[in-house]
Image (cartoon, grey):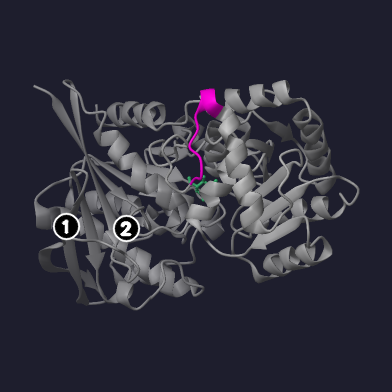
């Protein structure tokens, strides 16, 4: 008889229900990839639970009824719904703290703390309601980290059985605010932890402290968070826990991101018909109002406008490339200051640099399929998904050697990698890439090697499976 491992997978967002960034991609695809690994020996019953944000799009919701959790001498109501996603049960949790906060992430840290604390605890309580109990609680980032801490304190108080806690780190600097008041209102005690004092009241550190395994979203990021440079003050603590820290590279949805079948493209292509990319390049140049010329290198930035992503470095680098023949397209929204900087860059080079300051998934795929180089000079990058998508579409990445970028792009083989977070270093890499671009055979080889990389979820999901198995033994 096969053994079943029940996994409650919590996230703030998951595609296709609601997606703001990379976390949504991962939480939308990893749980399903895990379920698909079920075999004769082990069945993985992974179930996803999400807050029922107003922005959530879901069909065929089945109400699971109301229940409540104790708070501040009274109780707070929880409304739960169930839907299915390719055979996977997905739960949506609603309640006043979720309704009180219209957006997925608010600028008001306390509203977010109230919402996600409620969500994390309600998701734990849901298990009793549906009479299904997790062997592993798998949380993601600060928003849901409290579920692991809450599951541990419940065990202390109620003598409940051991439930393994896995916390995946997509972005360490975001730890959540001080939630000591919120914990008190839910009757959750603050443990004597060996966390640095400032961190003892924050959801992410508490979740890390209570977890059995800490997983960074790439092997390099798993090492980086142990250092002062990237450890955000928790490096000492993480070093003490280093036996439980690992790095598992995210995958991408290779069915969705497939240039051979992508309906957004003017011409579909694969590794053996890569010359058809030229059609996409021409269409893109036309659509953007650029000179239609296959010989001019077309550079792309598709990114949140955020200093994390180093877009400012890219802007400065492009600005100082007056005498170089190139075209560029910048797509994305975010920090108003960076959007402003993108505007000035376009005004400086109106004919060669185009900007589209919005989120547009279709245009993004046309850019991956039609441009020659993809710039990603991130200051830090836990994993990064765009560079993998770019490679899959034959667009050559130019990246900083940080986190997942370092694990996915090979200098000279699949892209161009530079070390220093400085615009001069990026500019040197871009110039080196442009030089290779003029050698058609060499360039094609880099494109094809990139397209040949396996970025599917399968390998990575298997690592999570091994981890679950080691924890529930
Ligand atoms: C965060 C990180 C990014 C990672 C994504 C998914 O957005 O910044 O590097 O790819 O999470 O794990």
In depth, the one of 142 and 400 nearer the eye is: 400
Disc 1 residue lies near ligand 1 with CB under 8 A: no
Q: Residues within 10 Å of mark 2 (few under 14, many from 20)?
A: some
User: Split into 4 quadrants, where in the image is the N terminus?
Assistant: top left
Q: Is residue 129 above or below residue 335?
A: above
> Residue at label 2?
17
- Residue 155 visible from this viewpoint: yes
> Residue at label 1?
82
**In x, y percent, where is residue 243?**
47, 30
In depth, the one of 366 and 175 nearer the eye is: 366
What is the secondary structure assignment of the residue under circle 2? loop
Q: Residue at x 79, y 30 (%)?
A: 438
Distance Cα–Cα, label 2 vs label 1? 13 Å
Q: Main secondary structure of the magenta part?
A: loop
Q: Residue at x 84, y 45 (%)?
A: 325
Q: Residue at x 70, y 45 (%)?
A: 299
Q: Is residue 39 left or right of residue 173?
A: left
Q: Is residue 444 above or below residue 164?
A: above
**In x, y percent, where is residue 451?**
54, 28
Magenta run includes residue 109 = no
The stretch in magenta equals: 265-273
């Amino acid at each position: 008889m096969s053994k079943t491992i029940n996994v409650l997978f919590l996230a703030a967002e998951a595609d296709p229900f609601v997606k703001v960034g990379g976390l949504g991609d991962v939480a939308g695809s990893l749980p399903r990839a895990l379920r698909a690994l079920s075999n004769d020996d082990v069945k993985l019953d992974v179930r996803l639970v999400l807050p029922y944000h107003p922005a959530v799009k879901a069909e065929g919701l089945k109400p699971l009824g109301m229940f409540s959790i104790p708070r501040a001498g009274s109780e707070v109501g929880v409304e739960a719904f169930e839907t299915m996603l390719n055979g996977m049960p997905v739960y949506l949790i609603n309640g006043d703290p979720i309704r009180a906060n219209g957006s997925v992430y608010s600028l008001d840290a306390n509203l977010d703390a109230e919402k996600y604390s409620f969500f994390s605890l309600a998701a734990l309580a849901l298990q009793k309601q549906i009479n299904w109990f997790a062997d592993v609680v798998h949380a993601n980032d600060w928003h849901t980290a409290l579920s692991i801490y809450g599951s541990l304190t419940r065990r202390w108080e109620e003598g409940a059985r051991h439930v393994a806690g896995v916390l995946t780190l997509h972005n360490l600097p975001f730890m959540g605010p001080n939630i000591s008041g919120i914990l008190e209102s839910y009757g959750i005690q603050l443990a004597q932890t060996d966390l640095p004092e400032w961190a003892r009241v924050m959801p992410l550190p508490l979740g890390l402290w209570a977890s059995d395994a800490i997983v960074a979203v790439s092997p390099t990021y798993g090492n980086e968070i142990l250092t002062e440079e990237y450890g955000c003050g928790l490096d000492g603590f993480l070093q003490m826990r280093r036996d439980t820290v690992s790095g598992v590279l995210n995958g991408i949805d290779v069915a969705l991101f497939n240039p051979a079948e992508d309906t957004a493209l003017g011409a579909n292509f694969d590794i053996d018909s890569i010359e058809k990319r030229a059609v996409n390049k021409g269409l893109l140049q036309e659509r953007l109002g650029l000179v239609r010329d296959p010989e001019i290198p077309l550079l792309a930035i598709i990114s949140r406008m955020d200093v994390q992503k180093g877009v400012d470095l890219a802007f400065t680098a492009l600005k100082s490339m007056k005498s170089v023949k190139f075209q560029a397209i910048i797509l994305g929204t975010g920090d108003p200051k960076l959007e402003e900087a993108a505007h000035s860059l376009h005004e400086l080079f109106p004919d060669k640099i185009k900007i589209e300051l919005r989120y547009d998934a279709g245009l993004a795929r046309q850019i991956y399929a039609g441009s020659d180089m993809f710039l990603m000079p991130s200051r830090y990058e836990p994993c990064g998904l765009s560079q993998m998508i770019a490679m899959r579409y034959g667009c050559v990445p130019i990246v900083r050697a940080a986190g997942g970028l370092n694990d996915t792009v090979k200098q000279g083989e699949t892209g161009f990698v530079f070390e220093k977070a400085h615009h001069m270093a990026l500019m040197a890499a871009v110039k080196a890439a442009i030089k290779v671009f003029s050698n058609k055979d060499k360039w094609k080889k880099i494109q094809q090697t990139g397209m040949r990389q396996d970025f599917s979820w399968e390998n990575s999901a298997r690592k999570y499976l091994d981890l679950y198995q080691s924890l529930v033994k």
